[in-house]
Structure formats: C-alpha cells, structure tokens
Amino acid sequence: MKDSKIIAMQKMLDAKEKRYYKIKALTEKYNLPVLSFMLNIPGEDKNFEEAVNFHRAYIEKIKNILENEDIKILWEEYNNLDTGMEYLAVLHGEGKFIKEKMIGLEEESREGRLLDIDIYDRDFSQISRSSLGLSERKCIICDDIARTCIKKERHSLNELEKKVREILKNYKSKN
C-alpha cells in the first residue's frame, strides 16, 4: 500500500496541474488576467472549518478591493477540494496593478501570510513579487525568507500546523 504522504503529494500535484491548465485556458479565452487564490495550509487536512471560513472571508476582501478599484470580475469559480479551497477569477484590469493590490492584502496583517494569491497576466505569465521589485514572502514562524525555511526544512510540520491554527484562531476572535 502507498504511503499516505505520497498519495497526498500526488493529489496536490494533480490539483496544481488541473489548475495550471484551467488558468491557461482562461487566459487564452479571455485574453485577460486571472487571479488564483488558495491558502498556505501545511499538512494533509486543509479543509477544516476555520480554514474554509477564513478563505471565504478573504474572497470577499479580494472582491471589495477589486470593486473599489473598478476592476470587474468577468468569470469566477470556487472549489472546495481535498487539496484545499480554490478560487479563480478572470479580471478586467491590468495584471501588475492587480498583483500590487493583492500583495497589499497579503501584507496588511499577520494572517496575510496564509494567503496564496497569484496573478497570471493575459499572456499566461505569472506576475511575481520580484518582477515588481518586491522582496520574497516571509516565513510565518521565524520571519526569514519562506522559501529558505522550506528548502532547509527548518520547521516541523507540527510546528507549522500549530502556528497556522493559532493565526486562524486569532483571526476568528478578531472578527
């Protein structure tokens, strides 16, 4: 029998591949930027109640930002998958400007570190923080560059899961 971690990893890779091709098809069909919003939730359980509610609350925050900037949503889809919640939207606006606004949302509070908001421009190129001259995301535990901590496996899965649940608990108590 396959190890559960291998099965979970395969599910994540399959979901990522499906999302990739869906986003590619959307950029080709609409010739407009596509927003992809997931959560950075470590571990296999990504659909616990606090995470689902948090994701839905942040979809509303994203929509409010877009509305305030007069950026229209031409198409949108929400899926609650085994691999986590997924929100996709085709936006009538300029990709780099939208990415800047989403980075602002990611950086406005501690819980913003759980947000994984990607913007794909009309040519299907992903707009990165570095392409905008911004620094990489920080680790939710030690404030070093997140990619460095992941690569060096500095923090245990248990430590990461505990921190995420603490952030979500604090968010829930504030709202």
Image (spheres, grey):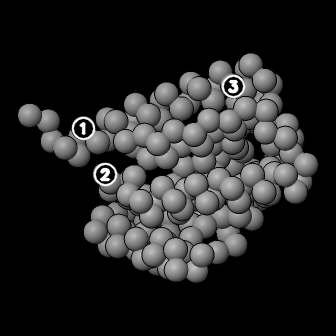
Q: In which quarter of the image is residue 92?
A: top right
Q: Residue at x 32, y 54 (%)?
A: 45
Label 2 crowding class (10 Å Cα cut-off): few <14, some 14-19, many 20+?
A: some
Picture coordinates of residue 42, whole percent (x, y): 38, 58
Along the horizontal axis of the image, is 131 left or right of 79? Answer: right
Per the image, the residue denoted by label 2 is 44
Quarter of the image with the N terminus is top left
CA separation in Å, label 1 and label 3? 29 Å
Q: Which residue is drawn at 73% across and 32% down?
A: 75
CA separation in Å, label 1 and label 2? 10 Å
Kind of element beneath mark 3: helix
Picture coordinates of residue 175, whole percent (x, y): 60, 75
Rendered position, 148 above or below 17: below
Per the image, the residue denoted by label 1 is 7
Q: Residue at x 59, y 26 (%)?
A: 22
Per the image, the residue denoted by label 3 is 26
